[in-house]
Image: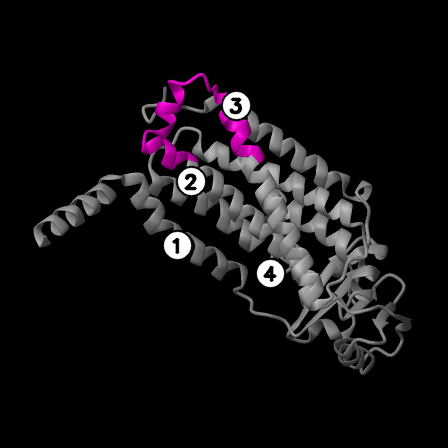
Amino acid sequence: MFRRFLALFRARNTEFWRDKSSFIWNVFFPFLLVFGFAFIFSNGQAMFKVGVLGEEDAYLSKPQLFALRHIQFVPYQDEFEAVKKLRQHQLDLLIQLDERVYWVNRSSPKGYMVERLLVANDDEYVRRVIDGRQVRYVDWVIPGVLGMNIMFSCLFGVGYVIVRYRKNGVLKRLKATPLGAFEFLAAQVLSRWLIVVFICMVVFFGCHWLFDTLMLGSYLSFFFVLALGTITMISLGLVVACRTRSEELTGGLLNVASWPMMGLSGVWFSLEGAPKGLQDFAYALPLTHIVEATRSIAIEGETLLAQSDHLLTLGVMAAVFLVIGATLFSWDADGR
């Protein structure tokens, strides 16, 4: 019995070490992930977040507040957008450098503190007060959690399963039947789409009942975005699984696709104030558009029309991924 166990143990280890691509993804990808997050958060977490209207570097007589440590200054070009962030307590203070005006939310404790720091040395700034309900972290994070659940359920629930079918010979046997590739892929997409959308509804309404989460927009609009995002993620899973035959390699590729999205798509934290190049990269990820669109609908009450850019991006991504996945799809492990 022990000899049989030892033989299987050796065979499985040999299979892994011979698969060079799987070895590379499993060994080097964690290092890349740690390096990436270490770079993003190398400056630590600021105590206060202050929005700035106007070009900060264009002013020689900036408030003394700018010389203090542990304050993050986030530039804005749109006053309406910045005031909205302040109203929702996502900013502690907003400063207009051109007109020497600042806004503060009267119900924000952090806003009160950073205002004291500002006026202590710069009393010529004009004060404007706004009100607004604080958006709790649970209200803010729910769209991100739903988007993350969609990502993992679709990528691994479609991509990994198809590769396992191919490796085990299931696809080869299906090829001998009248079933066409289009029928097989359509069934995979529709099945996973219905399951994921249903799970999202259960999770959302369960959290809404337990935590009284905020929903200022339309429920129909909210779930329309989730449904479209689900199709996009399923399509991406098909691209990964269209020809690969190694479960280890597929797992590595799916990790490469999913972990950057989970870290950079605004699931757990906002990328406001991050380097512009990093923000541009985040907008190339489908999860970013899912999270931002659903979050805007839920906590800002925006309509589908206001999210047209996100919807168009998701639709184009879904179409491109579906075409690539269907064109390159192979029944057999040898690529035929």
Q: Nearer the viewer, mark 1 or mark 4?
A: 4
Please tell me which of labels 4 and 2 falls first in the chain.
Answer: 2
- Report x, y in % for residue 144: 63, 55
**327 in relation to 97, above or below:** above
Give the amino acid at mark 4.
Trp
Query: Dot 1 corresponds to which residue?
Result: 30
Mark carried by residue 183: 3
Q: Amino acid at mark 3?
A: Glu
Q: Nearer the viewer, residue 190 or 299?
A: 190
User: How much space separates mark 3 and mark 4, taking CA atoms?
Assistant: 38 Å
**What residue is shown at x 54% (from left), y 63% (from top)?**
41
Mark 4 in CB contact with mark 2 (< 8 angstroms) = no
Res. 72 in view: yes
Q: Which element type, helix, strand or loop, lies under badge 2?
A: helix
- Dot 2 crowding, Cα within 10 Å, few <14, some 14–19, many 20+: many
Q: Which residue is mark 4?
A: 268
Q: Residue at x 32, y 29 (%)?
A: 169
Say which label, 1 or 4, has the lower sequence index.
Answer: 1
Which stretch did the figure color magenta?
A: 162-190
Q: Is residue 133 above or below residue 192?
A: below
**Residue 147 forms part of the magenta stretch:** no
